[in-house]
Amino acid sequence: MTTEPAIQFHDEQYYVAIRTKVKMSDIPAVLPPLIPEVFQWMEKNKIMPTGPCFFRYLSYDSDDQLLVDVGVPAQAPAQGDGRIITGSFPAANYVTVRYTGDYKELSHVHMALESWMKENGIKEGAQKIDGKEYGARTEFYITDPQEVPDPANWETDVSILLGNK
């Protein structure tokens, strides 16, 4: 089940993350184990999380590799240390839907949201990071699967940075 898309302005949001490349088919095995590492680094460095963990999809290359930030929103800007990077979601409009169900179906949620955007003349935005333009398509994992074991009850916000019309 997915809610209707909602467009909202969000202030800049800092985050702490691990940036990695991964094949789409390897996401379930490669990305989730990085989440505890980010939380541990934040705790060690006394940085307060301010929201649920997320996967931010930055780009997709010709080798079938996604560039992804596996991260956690942070209360304030921080300084990374190599493996751990820091960044921010820009202050901008985002379109978001809340999906309830198994993560295996999230690709369908992305496709449906893309179709809705196209039908409504809404363009995806980009953000410059280190001189390169990246998308800001993000899955925020609202429900912790360790606390809610039934995948039918997992909630995920799929959010896309919007560009100018």
Image (cartoon, rainbow, N blue to C red):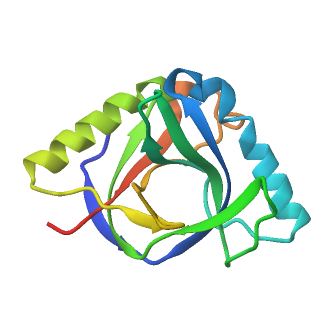
Which is more toward the observer, 124 or 115? 124
Residue displayed at 30% across by 61% down: 125
Q: Could you tell me residue 12's position as x and y percent?
A: 49, 76
- Image: 112 above or below 88: above
Q: Quadrant of the N terminus?
A: top left
Labels in figure, total: 0
Asked if residue 21 is positioned above or below residue 74 in the image, the reply reads above
Q: Is residue 102 visible?
A: no
Residue 2 at least partly seen: yes
**Most extreme residue toward the top, as rendered?**
25
Q: Position of residue 144 (x, y in %)?
A: 65, 41
Q: Seen in the image, is 97 located left or right of residue 73?
A: left
- Examine the rendered structure and indicate whether residue 57 appears above or below residue 66: below
Q: Is residue 135 left or right of residue 81?
A: left
At x 91% / y 63%, what residue is drawn? 44
Residue 6 percent location from the top left of the image = 27, 58
In which quadrant will I find the C terminus?
Answer: bottom left
Q: Is residue 119 left or right of residue 65?
A: left
The image shows residue 66 at horizontal and vertical percentages of 50, 37
Q: Quadrant of residue 143?
A: top right
State the residue in front, 64 or 162.
Answer: 64
Which quadrant of the figure has residue 133?
A: bottom left
Q: Residue at horizontal 58%, vertical 29%?
A: 27
- Near-viewer residue (53 or 45): 45
Image position of 123 (left or right of 159): left
